[in-house]
Image (spheres, rainbow, N blue to C red):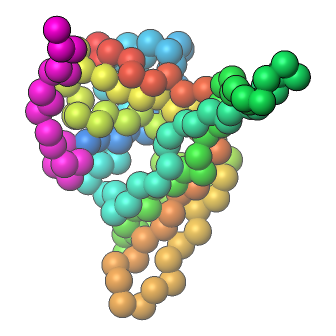
Amino acid sequence: MVATPIAATSRYIPPGTTRYYWVATISNYLSPTRGELNAGTDLTGEISAVSGFATSSDQQDTPDLGSRFVSKIPGRITADDSSITMYASSTSSDARTLMPRDTAGYIVAFAEGDVTGQKMDVFPVKVTSVPKSRDVENPAGMTFQYAITRIPAENVTIP
């Protein structure tokens, strides 16, 4: 008897599908309400790049004097350095007014779109800096850098 194959996926690419919201307040970020998500701001249309917004776990060696084999156990969970690069407006009316340095809130990532019943990730964050691009050949922008302040709520069902 052979193992059961994993179910086939419906593959996609992030552009046109993935959405990112900035939500200033969520009472329980492990289970946001539809009203809290709707009160946020959809950043998607102004984003040119996203980096980070992922967690990883260290692995700790657990040597045993009775064996030459060194096994491992999961260690601390850490979050990658995370940022979102967004376009700047010639009128200064852009995301800088929404997320200035030291602002706390939540980045909500909907990898497969904001679709009820699917999954989202909620990252409690604080804006650490917002450096502006000084490139003279490309559209003006700024990179919002975030400290992830608590363990993210990953794979939460969208209400």
Residue 37, given in percent of the width and then of the height, sits at: 36, 25
The answer to whether residue 103 of the structure is visible from this angle is no
Question: Quick check: 109 left or right of 78?
Answer: left
Q: Is residue 109 visible?
A: yes
Quarter in which the C terminus is drawn: top left
Position of 49 relative to 80 (above/below):
below
- Is residue 8 left or right of 102 when viewed as pictured? left
Give the residue at the far top of this rendering.
1
Q: Which residue lies at the image location 46% right of the left edge and 54% below the top edge?
A: 51
Q: Is residue 2 magenta?
A: yes
* Above-or-below relation of 141 to 56: below
Query: Residue 86's x, y, as percent?
Result: 40, 61
Chief SS of the magenta region: loop
The residue at 50%/40% (across/down) is: 54
Q: Quadrant of residue 12?
A: top left
Q: In this orientation, which residue lies closer to the viewer: 28 or 41?
A: 28
Residue 15 falls within the magenta-colored stretch: yes
Screen quadrant of the N terminus: top left
**Along the horizontal axis of the image, is 127 left or right of 138?**
right
Residue range highlighted in magenta: 1-17
Write the residue at 78% across / 30% down. 68
Residue 152 location (% of width, % of height): 54, 27
Q: Kindly identify the residue that appears in the image at 12 percent across and 27 percent down.
A: 8
Residue closest to the eye, 63 or 157: 63
The furthest residue to the right: 65
Locate residue 135, reporting x and y percent.
Answer: 45, 86
Residue closer to the observer: 87 or 117 = 117
